[in-house]
Image (tube, grey):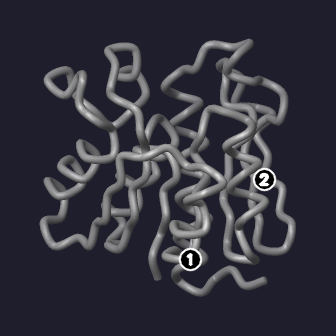
Amino acid sequence: MKIGLFGCGGIGSNIAMNLVREGFDNFILIDFDKIERSNLNRQFYFENQIGNYKSLTLKENLLNINSTLSLETHVEKISKENIKFYVDKCDILVEAFDEKNMKELLMENSNGKYFISANGIGGTNLENIEIKKFKKNFIVGDFCSDIKNFKTHCSKVIYISAIMSNIISKILKGEINE
């Protein structure tokens, strides 16, 4: 099965790293953004990679874990015009965007595929993290700490990424069905 990572920042890069370390090897990485110094506290990137495109650099980092991966990368922003092209290529959709409108665009076009998303990843409170499941949709977070109002912290981003990675792993192993 092919996993589509829509966003390669804090959530996306850490989910990819987790799943590759667990042995999964078929991904599409989609992100238009470049690595900034402020990303290094919570994303799977390094100081010497600042200024590089996230999707291309994530591919490089993942291949350093497993050189036999099947990785397709795109430096592109998702839009109404290209969303179907990417969704059609994937079996599992991982929404890892910062912007609400991008999250909605992917969810609205998920076409009944597995859809894993985060909502409420700001701040440091880990006690209120929950998983909401609706058929093939899974949303993980505290559902209140928008990153526009709360700083993002490594521990919370990594924690939510690990929960999302675990859900994806269970889907891929056949432990979760509709």
Give the residue at x 72% y 64%: 109
Taking depth in this image into account, of 161 and 148 the one nearest to the observer is 148
Q: Is 35 situated above or below 85?
A: above
User: Residue beneath label 1, please?
Assistant: 88
Residue extending farthest to the front is: 81
Coordinates of residue 166 in the picture (x, y in percent): 56, 62
User: Residue beneath label 2, please?
Assistant: 131
Which amino acid, mark 1?
Asp
Number of residues whose C-alpha sits closer than 10 Å to that of mark 1, classed few (under 14), some (14–19) or many (20 or more):
few
Disc 2 versus disc 1: distance between alpha carbons?
26 Å
SS at mark 1 in the image: helix
Q: Is 91 situated above or below 21?
A: below
Q: Is 72 situated above or below 142?
A: below
Which amino acid, mark 2?
Ile
Q: Where, quadrant-wise, is the C terminus in this rendering?
A: bottom right
Q: Which mark is residue 149?
A: none
SS at mark 2 in the image: strand
Coordinates of residue 41 in the picture (x, y in percent): 39, 20
Q: Is 169 situated above or below 63?
A: below
Picture quadrant of residue 115 = bottom right
Give the residue at x 43% y 44%: 31
Query: Upstream in the sequence, badge 2 or badge 1?
Result: 1
Coordinates of residue 174 in the picture (x, y in percent): 59, 87
Give the residue at x 25% y 47%: 56
Give the residue at x 40% y 22%: 39
Image-based side of 114 in relation to 158, left or right: right
